[in-house]
Image: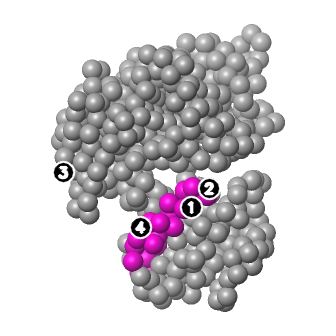
Amino acid sequence: MHTEYSTLDAWLAHCERLHPQNIALGLERVREVARRLDLRFDCPVVTVAGTNGKGSSCAMLEAIALQAGYRTGVYGSPHLVRFEERCRIRGDVVATADLLPHFGAVEEARTRDASVSLSYFEFTTLAILRLMSQAGLDVAILEVGLGGRLDATNIVDADCAIVTSIDLDHMEYLGPDRESIGREKAGILRPGRPAIVSDPVPPQSVVAHAEAIGADLWRFGRDFNYSGDQQQWSWAGRGRRYAGLAYPALRGANQLVNASGVLAAFEALRGVLPVTAQAVRTGLAMVELPGRFQIVPGQPTLVLDVAHNPHSVAALAANLDAMGFYPTTHAVFGAMADKDLGAMLAKVQPLIDRWYFTDLPTPRAESAAQLLAKWRAVQIVAGQRREVPASTYADPLAALRGAIAAADPADRIVVFGSFYTVGGVLKDGVPRLDAPHLNAQNSA
């Protein structure tokens, strides 16, 4: 008799106990359980791998497909606040009750005959994939969690694969440089199927792998490209053009690169998943994704961004710089200990006038006190002359409260460094930025 739980929290706690490691590489165990589940998709599948831009690319794929009238399913990780955010069906976050039978099915398959060990990520991925495979979808969009080659999502043979920008992250698992990381990401590519590489300067390993297996390689700058001015932008691919497009609703300079890869994917899938120019225009205009250079209305201005490696923090810095003048910029920052924290802090340091370092509720996180020490070291290396106030907090909401208490209405507050940092600020909903309301609500 296999274990059965009545709540999602109980299932997730069970998944955490099953395997000693959070991340376990290798697909044999996941493949075996998927075989026992008879897991298969009857619709086109698009997988998206890369260091940065995966979530944004998945959201744009979903938004355009929804506008074209398709029944969409999206799997992505990690979540910001609630686990259920990892799966959207037809644009809506999946209902908790709908997930439970699939956790039970994975557990039954896992323990049947010879029991198979699964990590938290592998178990939960199988449960969501099973739900999606039975949801009557027209298209399934899968965000690849870590690498590609050995990621649990790679048990599914995608009809089209997108590789977004590649940078240094998760190096203990993926390798020490862009070439080795690119080789891992390229593991999602399949022979004879479209391989969209939206990184403008991809590692040679990605291109070489695509060519070696005979994938249909679409390279940015060769097979598709974009151009734009301050009002609008245009895209051109193999045999198709879109002119006079409005900028995507997701803010940031890098979003045109992501959008270009998405349009290439739709062009590559035109035979099985045609979309109209109107669906492209409306989808890009309406796309939403919390925590990606998300600007919350109110005073002071609040910017939420899950940037958590040097490459994405550099993009955040460029986007902050382009926002114009603010008398003071306050930064709420919490991050994982295994990140290149010195490089992350150095890239954004010239723009920040006050720091609010925070602890995060996970053993992987660096403590606020250590973040403060690392920031001081970065200041010394940079020869920082100006006095920049800094303080430490027990959680992101407390840090945000500290920033709001110190900020003038014309100032700007940026919250970044990790999904946990932004999620901690969003856990009671999007904060309203009239300071008395937030302070009263959270000191009650």
* Residue 301 highlighted magenta (yes or no): yes
Residue that appears at 54% across and 77% down: 351
Q: Is residue 260 left or right of residue 158?
A: left
Q: Are marks 1 and 4 in contact (CB under 8 Å)?
A: no
Residue 376: give x, y in percent of width and height. Answer: 75, 77
Which residues, given as a range, are shown in magenta?
A: 299-324
Camera-side residue of 274 and 439: 274
Q: Are marks 1 and 2 in contact (CB under 8 Å)?
A: yes
Q: Crowding at label 1, few (<14), some or many (≥20) Cα neighbours within 10 Å?
A: many
The residue at which mark 4 appears reads as: 295
Residue that appears at 53% across and 48% down: 52
Camera-side residue of 286 and 11: 286
Q: Residue furthest top?
A: 113
Q: Image quadrant for the N terminus?
A: top right
Residue 438 seen in this snapshot: no
The residue at which mark 1 appears reads as: 313
Q: What kind of residue is marked 1?
A: Val
Q: Are marks 3 and 2 in contact (CB under 8 Å)?
A: no
Residue 374: give x, y in percent of width and height. Answer: 76, 70
The residue at which mark 2 appears reads as: 309
The residue at which mark 3 appears reads as: 244
Q: Image quadrant for the C terminus?
A: bottom right
